[in-house]
Amino acid sequence: MEIHVIHYLVISTIMMFCGIYGFFTRKNLLALLISVELMLNATNINFAVFNRYLFPGQLEGHFFTLFGIAIAAAETAVAIAIIINVYRNVKQILTDDITDLKG
Amino acid sequence: MEIMELLSFQNIVFYVVAAAIALCSVLAVTTGKLLRAATYLLFVLFGTAAVFFMLGYTFLGAVQLMVYAGGIIVLYVFSIALTRSDKDMRYKVSKAKLFSVLATTVVGAALVLLLLFTNGFALNAIPLGEELPSREVGLALIGTEKYQFVLPFEVVSVLLLACMIGGILIARKEK
């Protein structure tokens, strides 16, 4: 028995739209970042699945996913550094509190 | 016969993992506590790694486990503790906003699912249990020919270095 390609894509769709929902409703910056991670993960799954599905002999999607993971790690590190700095200055990390970015 | 049993076992594992991913990603964006959201994200990342393993991309699954589940989640947990934000997160969202968000999400998801189901994928199945050898991955990662990826690899290393320095610079305490 083989698994239909749609089943993989349905998982990534659910993950993507959970991320979008969270990105719109959450107010804590770290929760926003968690939603972004969900969206990035969904795209990673899609790249890997389409690579496997369309060109099993080639590795483009595989490496795109690999670099996507690396870039997500870099993005998270910088974002968390910024969030910690915001916390140090404003003592809150809610989106309502950082409407103006004064130094 | 034995092969058939193995494959149907893989099918069962796939659907269990799929259900876990769907449930945990819904919980990760709806739960009230930030630390719980991070934990649910961890389970989603585990599930994604399992999907990569099932696709045969074992190297990718291992990278996912190490970088995401091992590295990024630890960063999250520490920054949640550092910013003391593990309190109740159920802030008031206005009804109009909640309605528009739900409408956007549901309509978007319905559109994407409709496109998926009416697209009619030609081959309609992905073979299970064919592993991509890591030797091939390694050769493609450091080769300089066509369809080999040494340049993006180097660019990503420089990007990671820049991000590390940037992160240290930003998060450092000013004296």
Image: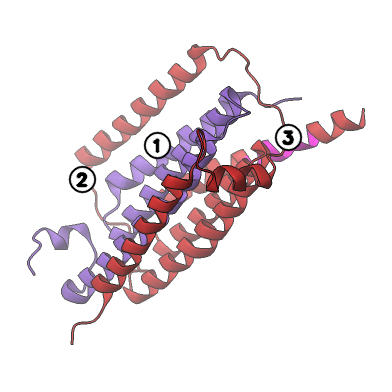
Chain colours: A purple, B red
Q: Nearer the viewer, residue B84 or A69?
A: A69
Is label 1 in a helix, a strand or a loop?
helix
Q: Which mark is residue A61?
A: none
Question: Is B15 part of what is drawn in magenta?
Answer: yes
Q: Which amino acid type is marked by label 1? A: Phe
Q: Is residue B62 left or right of residue A63?
A: right
Q: Which amino acid type is marked by label 2? A: Ser
Same-chain check, marks 1 and 2: no
Q: State the predominant SS element of the stretch in magenta.
A: helix
User: Residue under circle 3?
Assistant: B130
The residues colored magenta run B8-17
Marks 1 and 2 close (CB-CB < 8 Å):
no
Q: Chain of mark 3?
A: B
**Cα distance, mark 1 to mark 2?**
20 Å
Question: Of discs 3 and 1, which sits in the foreground?
Answer: 3
Residue at far bottom of view: B175
Q: Which mark is residue B94?
A: 2
**Residue B16 can be seen, yes or no:** yes
Q: Chain of mark 1?
A: A
Q: Nearer the viewer, residue B46 or B146?
A: B146
**Cα distance, mark 3 to mark 1?**
30 Å
